[in-house]
Amino acid sequence: MSSKSKWMLSGISSVLALSILLPTAANADKLSDLERKQQEAQHHKHELTSDISKKTEKMAKNALKLEEIMGKIEDLNHKIEETKAKIDSVQADIDYTKAEIDELRKSIEELERKIAERDQLLQERARAIQLSGGSVDYVDVLLGANNFVDFIDRFSAVNTLIEADREIMREQAADKKLLAEQKVQVERKLAEQEQRRIELVSLNDKLNGQKKEQAGLVEELKAEQKQLSKEKSQLVQQRNEAISVSSDLEKQIEKEQNRLAELARKAEEARQQKLAAERKAAAQKARNSSSSASSYTAPARVINSGFITPTSGRYTSRFGWRNIGDGPEFHQGVDIANSIGTTVKAAASGYVSFAGNMGGYGNVVILTHSINGQTHATVYAHLNSIDVSAGQEVSQGQRVGGLGNSGRSTGPHLHFEIHVGPWNGARTNAVNPASFVSL
């Protein structure tokens, strides 16, 4: 076989090996589909976590409301006890007043008896006067005296009778007045106490009504708490299932990326073999023509230059811990600020493993590289535009998109990450890009 044929066969073999090993668009599409599903699972998990937080917050509010209502019920219980004590006190006063009334009634009966006796006496005196032909003439009684001593006796008797009549009349009037006053006093006191008792019973009924109403609220809140707890448990179970799904998807993504990375590594080996063969062929050609050339200059050796800075602009945020208003967080890359649309270039040659929107990343391109036998991934986030597609091969320095402000961003900038190994959702293998590119 001629030397020319050998070189042609070597070249064809290299091309075939390269075409077999290169990641296909279908492979990249599968990876993109897995990453999309993972984003959906993550989004669902975040929604469930948010719902769980809302349920927990509502349960906490209900617990506070329950505590407040229970406090009110306790106060009502105290008031009810106080009211019952007052009712008992008033009832005791009523019982005492009724005992007084019983005593007073006896006194009234005695007064009524005395009044009746006096009325009887007065009626008898009136009948006696009528039987004697009219009123008694005390002067005739006095003038009918036989002597002075009889006159004195008669005068004394007349005075006694007159005074007795007057005393009877005074006592009668006083007893009637006292009787009337005692009746009014007893009736008023009894009426006041009875009114007080009615008011207290009404207050007690009102307090019991309030207590019943509060107890009803307690039962409603307890039922709501039970329902919220049930719903929260269901959400927690769904979130755990979502976490499990997300974890499974992440493993699938990792497996697919590892497969693509292996294909990229083999493709890189094939490329290096091809370059070596080309260099060897060029050297042989140079040796064959050395007799006709006065001097020979060997072709420049191709050296892998690693990564380049993906865009121009101002370096605004470093790799590591920071706080941009939502609390401390670990920044997995670096930020380079510039105007919207500024060209964003591939930091190294490789293949597009993802191109699309990814939550907080906004519009993002993820490239997979094989550099010196080591798999790397680079991330270009918050893009305004995407100029590549999944499965596409890109060269170092090729435009992959335009700088933007999409996703969780505070201004136009490129968020740039470098990962040693395939990219993963937890970004556990992110390294400081400043160690690889000039910023």
Image: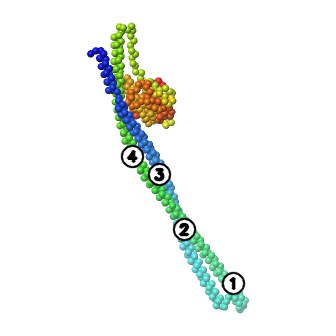
Instruction: Mark 3: give few (<14), some (14-19) or many (20+) Cα within 10 Å.
Output: many
Which amino acid type is shown beneath numbered disc 1?
Asn
* Residue 70 percent across, percent down from the top left: 48, 53
* Residue 341 percent across, percent down from the top left: 49, 30
Looking at marks 3 and 4 on the same chain, the residue that comes earlier in the sequence is marked by 3
* Residue 7 percent across, percent down from the top left: 31, 17
Q: Residue at x 48, y 53 (%)?
A: 69
- Asked whether 74 or 375 is in front, the reply is 375
| Residue at which label 1 appears | 159
Disc 3 to disc 1, C-alpha distance: 89 Å
Say if 52 sits above or below 5 in the image.
Answer: below
In front of the other: label 3 or label 4? 4
Marks 2 and 3 in Cβ contact (< 8 Å): no
Marks 1 and 4 in Cβ contact (< 8 Å): no
Which amino acid type is shown beneath numbered disc 4?
Gln
In front of the other: label 2 or label 3? 3
- In the rendering, which numbered label is found on residue 66? 3
* Residue 67 percent across, percent down from the top left: 48, 51
Which amino acid type is shown beneath numbered disc 3?
Leu
- Asked whether 150 or 3 is in front, the reply is 3
- In the rendering, which numbered label is found on residue 234? 4
Determine whether the residue tagged by mark 2 lies in a helix, strand or loop. Answer: helix
